[in-house]
Amino acid sequence: MAKKSWIARERKRKRMVEKYATRRAALKAAGDWEGLQRLPRDASPVRMRNRCALTGRSRGYLRKFGLCRIAFRDMARAGIIPGIRKSSW
């Protein structure tokens, strides 16, 4: 499990990106680079990090499921994720 502060920081960044999205798009379209630099750093979507929905782990993230590899494996083995099952041949 990731630290609570890291998870909270990511949530805060996500809210900030959503808040400034239209303003950033307008400034980019106008070519106002100084105006873009005056916005908060965390308003840039590049600074966001994908995290597992269950554990908050940032590494081994699977976009399609929104989970880290470890949580995905546990849930797949338990049969919780529809359409996924352990392979055998």
Image (cartoon, grey):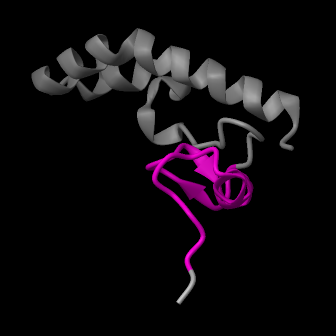
Return the x and y of residue 5 as percentages of the image width and height: 84, 28
| 10 left or right of 8 in image | left
Q: In front here: 29 or 8?
A: 8
Q: Which image quadrant is residue 34 in?
A: top left
Return the x and y of residue 24 as percentages of the image width and height: 30, 20
Residue at the front extreme of this rendering: 89
Residue 78 colored magenta? yes
Q: In front here: 64 or 89?
A: 89
Return the x and y of residue 38 as percentages of the image width and height: 43, 18
Q: Identify the residue at horizontal 40%, vertical 26% (top origin).
A: 37
Residue at the bottom extreme of this rendering: 89
On screen, 62 above or below 82? Answer: below
| 8 left or right of 26 in image | right
Q: Identify the residue at horizontal 54%, vertical 27% (top origin).
A: 42
On screen, 3 above or below 87? Answer: above
On screen, 10 above or below 38? Answer: below
| 17 left or right of 88 in image | left
Residues in magenta? 58-87
Return the x and y of residue 20 as percentages of the image width and height: 39, 13
Residue 15 colored magenta? no
Q: In front here: 14 or 84?
A: 84
